[in-house]
Amino acid sequence: MYQKAVTSCVLGMMSIFLPFIGILFGWIGLLFANKALVELTTDAPGYRFALGGKICSVVGLCLQFCILIFILAAYFFFMNLNLFM
């Protein structure tokens, strides 16, 4: 049926809302979405779930990487200020 499509949709949504572990959920959701999109035709009932899962996974990955870069940049910026010396 379309369990891969629903799984990709759920993992894609989880990748948006869960910090740091969302990177892992985004990659797994993207893999499931790609497998489901290969198996399903455009008029199949799970096609939109797979497409939504792929979109949510990509958005979640971009968001998680932006957050990670922001945290690392803030850490290195404030580490070099020597505010407490």
Image: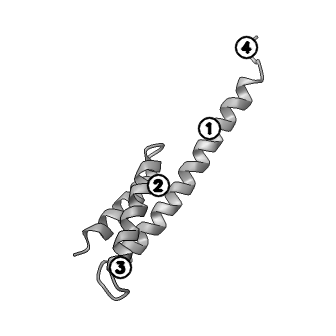
Q: Which residue is mark 1?
A: 71
Asked if the residues shown at circle 3 and circle 2 are in contact, with their CB atoms under 8 angstroms apart, the answer is no
Dot 2 falls on a residue whose secondary structure is helix
On screen, residue 20 versus residue 9, left or right, reads: right
Mark 3 / mark 1, whichever is N-terminal: 3
Dot 3 falls on a residue whose secondary structure is helix
Where is residue 26 drawn, in percent x and y?
Answer: 44, 56
Mark 2 / mark 4, whichever is N-terminal: 2
Dot 1 falls on a residue whose secondary structure is helix
Q: Residue at x 39, y 54 (%)?
A: 14
Asked if the residues shown at circle 3 and circle 1 are in contact, with their CB atoms under 8 angstroms apart, the answer is no
Q: Which residue is mark 3?
A: 47
Q: Residue at x 73, y 31 (%)?
A: 77
As measured in the structure, the alpha-carbon distance from the residue carrying label 2 to the one carrying label 4 is 35 Å
Mark 3 / mark 2, whichever is N-terminal: 2
On screen, residue 55 versus residue 43, left or right, reads: right
As measured in the structure, the alpha-carbon distance from the residue carrying label 3 to the one carrying label 2 is 21 Å
Mark 1 / mark 4, whichever is N-terminal: 1
Disc 3 packing (10 Å; few <14; some 14–19; many ≥20): many
The amino acid at mark 3 is Tyr
Q: Which quadrant: the N terminus? A: bottom left
Q: Which residue is mark 4?
A: 84
As measured in the structure, the alpha-carbon distance from the residue carrying label 1 to the one carrying label 4 is 20 Å
As measured in the structure, the alpha-carbon distance from the residue carrying label 3 to the one carrying label 1 is 36 Å
